[in-house]
Image (cartoon, rainbow, N blue to C red):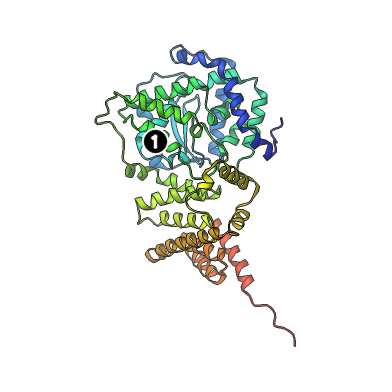
Amino acid sequence: MSPALSRKEGLGVIGPLIAFLAVSLAPVQAQDSTASQVAFKFTTVDNKLLDEVTEYNRQLEKKGLIFHDADLDAYINTIGQDLIAHQPQLENVHFRFRVLRDPMVNACAFPDGSIYVNTGLLAVLENEAQLASIFGHEATHVINRHMYLENRSMRKKVLAINILEGIASNMPAGSTFGAAVALGANLSAAILVGTIYGYSQDKERDADRHGFELMVAASYDPHAMPRTFELLDERLEFEPLDTFYRTHPKLEERHRTAMERIQGVQSTDARMGGESEYLAHAAPAICANIEADLNCRRARTAVARALRLQQWNPAEPRYRVLLADAYRALGAKTAEPTVEEEGRHGQAEHRKLYFRMTEQEEQARLLTKPEGSAARSENFSKSEALYRRTIEQNPDYALAHRGLGFLYEQEGNNSEAAREYRKYLDLTADTNLDHLRIARRLAQIEKTMQPGPAPQK
């Protein structure tokens, strides 16, 4: 099968592919229990994978997919280093903990010690201990050489890899959702499978078990692990691709096992970390993720994330404007999925709309129904109020004027939209790329506002 798989074909093979991989990887499960206890002997195949991982890390940086924030970088690195502090030094491993710009709820680890957590997953978590549970799981994949072992068993599975490449090519165009997946599809089968579908069941159970032990050894509250699985199970809308972190029934089993594991474990004075402290570090990445969610037609998720930040720090204008942007993008949708949408038929319908309609077409379809018009009116009203409140408190906050201009333009109020766009242009430098975009938008609006030629007598 060619990597240029059609969209319809790509969607149709996801379920069978997961089953195929689960069966085809089963023969290597017996290696897991001893892998970390026996000196790992590098082969030519392993060295080739290590070179591919090095190139993958380089490409992530080159393409701007790594989120950089000095405070957040230091925060997550401290958490990660605490977890692996007492682990023996491994050949060809240098642990680094980094953030990927991707709204997909995911984290992944590579055999050189590079561990990535997506902005989408950071936006879901509530505290430091939950993040530690993620890092402990991923660090175990590195410590126990899981990707090397998996790669040795996958080198001849060309068919599966071609299918995976086809799926990767069907990620939402023009967005960062799954961008790292698409990049991995071009480099290595092991990278792609390891980052999305996870490893054999024994390897994943091993990662949860040893990750739990790393948490406890680092004095993190073990109750954070089952709570993390609960959070991973929550979603507000269709996602183009389920990762290992979102897959059922694995989540149910992992939650049940984690609950059993914490029985009898003393957690007095164990670190959990409050949500406020966590958000103080993670907020920049969550803001970036809200913008990515909006670009991926995930307005419901964007509303939930922005509302969380706005409630945490009501005085911050950026959070208020992001929430206004999210309500504006929500349009004719309700902020929460309806009962019908949550059902199997509703989910299938949402999936169909996502891939067969543009966002504008989907909104137009929703507006043919009275409830769609009512939702749009309510959402636009909330959006306008948030923009205006921001401008009242911060008159020179340019993004509020820009968002209000978009809102008025969507409502067909071109004169008010033009006024807000002019204010935005006055407040931003003409070297700003977005300044140029808004200037062009303003010119188009002003053109439509010009009176036509006087009728001839």
**Nearest the camera: 46 or 220?**
220
Q: Tell me residue 236's x, y (percent).
A: 49, 45
Query: What x and y, as percent, mark residue 47?
Result: 56, 19
Position of residue 215 relative to residue 448, above or below, is above
Q: Residue at x 36, y 23 (%)?
A: 213
State which quarter of the image contains the N terminus: top right
Residue at (33% x, 29% y) in the render: 222
Task: Using the rendered image of the protein, determine whether residue 238 is visible from the camera's viewpoint.
Answer: yes
Left/right of residue 2 with respect to residue 274 in the rendered view: right
Residue bearing the label numbered 1: 76
Q: Is residue 250 above or below residue 148?
A: below
Nearest the viewer among 291 and 437 is 291
Residue 432 image point, x, y percent: 53, 57
Q: Is residue 272 left or right of residue 53?
A: left
- Image quadrant in which the C terminus is located: bottom right
Q: Amino acid at mark 1?
A: Ile
